[in-house]
Amino acid sequence: MLELINLTKKYDDYTAVDNITLKVEAGEIFGLLGPNGAGKSTTVSMISTVKSPTSGEIKVDNKSLNKNPIEAKKIMGIVPQDIALYEALSAKDNLEFFGSLYGLSRKELKKRTLEVLELIELMDKKDQPVSEFSGGMKRRVNIGIALMNNPKLLILDEPTVGIDPQSRNHILETVKKLNEEKGMTVIYTSHYMEEVEFLCKRVAIVDHGKLIAMGTKEELKEKLKACDTLTVTFNEATEKALETIKNIDGIEKVTIKNNQISMLVIPQESNVMNIMDSLRNLGIKLTSFKYDEVNLESIFLQITGKSLRE
Ligand code: ADP
């Protein structure tokens, strides 16, 4: 459905998107996960033809975007990060106005507007001016606009940043529903690993413009020999004891910040108990303990040495 081939975007000397190659299959929800500044929005802007690539190619439904931009736009719905709505107009009028740009007939436009209001669950507020909406509701109208032409491919750029938890859940559920019930292919960019884990089977992890890993969570776990995470806090420990932690068997990497120790642990049943025993033997007095099975956050930490939100 979408193919990026050696896609690169430079701003002067700075490479925001660096030689990215990936393929999104029809019918999947594909996650583009990376911290702020990773190049996600720049990638989406190139797919939406707002920005042109410095080099590389984009194919939509097997056709070059460069050669067939109008054809491609017909099957894509893009939800940019910035909300662009007419504040004085109602939700319904916004959808009708933006929908009219797709060239729908008057009758189709009316019908589709009602369908979309139903989908974004704003039917009861359809006549209210958007200026009275919360950030989350405005974001839902923005998504509605991208749905007006019933796209085969929906691309959402960090759609839940800065909105209330209720709208966030609503957006996640809507995306899932569009995929499951209407077979819509979705590309979902985010720096929230929980969202990507919830929605996406396959994910591309990006950092500093580069694709650093791609696959299902299971494939990434296998390929990277990814670790579980054990986090403890302590109120007493000598410098020497802290120095020695990295030598404990079963630990891949240790990060100590203030009185918290984060350890990447090789997933094996006996490891956690052994590590806890070793910490006790080193005279480290623990006040809390948390064990997390491998997730996209720890995979990211393992590859880049930093957390997604740093
Ligand atoms: P993300 O969406 O993952 O947060 P962006 O694609 O917005 O990342 O940005 C990637 C990098 O490109 C950032 O370092 C950002 O500062 C830089 N960047 C984005 N737009 C421009 C621009 N118009 N001119 C120069 N640098 C830019």
Image (cartoon, helix red, strand yellow):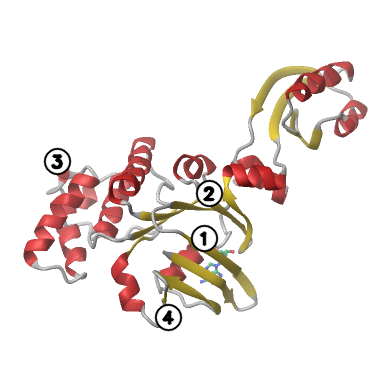
Residue 127 % position (x, y): 12, 49
Residue 97 % position (x, y): 17, 64
Q: Is residue 234 above or below residue 59?
A: above
Q: Secondary structure at mark 1?
A: helix
Which of the 4 quarters of the picture holds residue 259? top right
Which of the 4 quarters of the picture holds residue 61? bottom left
CA separation, marks 4 and 3?
41 Å
CA separation, marks 1 and 4?
20 Å
The residue positioned farthest toward the bottom in the image shown: 67
161 or 145, which lies in front?
145
- The image's mark for residue 40 is 1
Residue at screen point 40% across, 51% down: 159
Mark found first going from the N terminus, 4 or 2:
4
Disc 2 residue: CB within 8 Å of ligand 1: yes
Residue 193 % position (x, y): 54, 43
Residue type at numbered disc 2: His
